[in-house]
Image: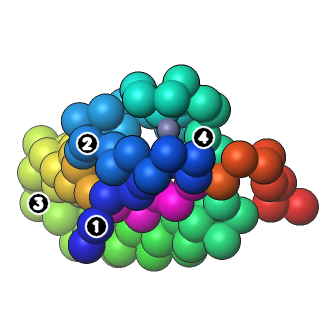
Amino acid sequence: MKLPTCWSCRYSFKWKELLLHFRKIECPRCGLHQQITKRKLQQSQVITFIITFFTLVGIHFIYPYSLIGALIYVISIMLIALLFSPFIYEFTDKEEYLF
Ligand SMILES: [Zn+2]
C-alpha cells in the first residue's frame, strides 16, 4: 500500500495529512487543489458497501448477546476504515463526478 502523490508536483502526502480530509485536499508544497479520481471514488463506494454489509451481518450475530459489544464492533470497523482510507486515494486536477 502506498500513499497518494500530488498530481502537479508529485509531493507524497503523509498519512496524517489525509486522515480527516474527505473531498477538499490541497497540496502542502504547491498549494494546488487535489481531486480524488473517479476510479478511486467508485472503488471507495464498493469498499464502503462491503464494509457496511459485513458490519450489518456482524451486528446481527453480536447484538442478541451484547448491545455494548455490537457498538464496540461498529466503532472499531469505522475506525479501521478511517485509518486505511488515505491509502485508497489517487489525485487528479479535474473534478470528476460519479454520474
Ligand atoms: Zn503539489
SS for callout 4? strand
Circles 1 and 4 in contact, beta carbons < 8 Å? no
Cα–Cα gap, marks 1 and 4: 17 Å
Circle 1 residue: 2
**Observer-nearest residue: 40 or 68?**
40
SS for callout 3? loop
Residues in magenta?
87-91
Amino acid identity at mark 3: Tyr
Q: Respond yes or no on whether mark 1 lies under 8 Å from ligand 1.
A: no
Q: Quadrant of the N terminus?
A: bottom left
Circle 4 residue: 34
Q: Position of residue 52 (x, y in %)?
A: 44, 64
Circle 2 residue: 14
Give the label, 4 or 3, closer to the camera.
4
Q: Residue at x 21, y 54 (%)?
A: 80
Sequence-wise, which precedes: disc 2 or disc 4? Answer: 2
Residue 23: quadrant of the picture: top right
Residue 39: quadrant of the picture: bottom right
Amino acid identity at mark 2: Lys
Q: Residues within 10 Å of mark 2 (few under 14, many from 20)?
A: few
Q: Residue at x 40, y 57 (%)?
A: 4
Sequence-wise, which precedes: disc 4 or disc 3? Answer: 4
Q: Residues within 10 Å of mark 4 (few under 14, many from 20)?
A: many
Cα–Cα gap, marks 2 and 1: 10 Å
Circle 3 residue: 65
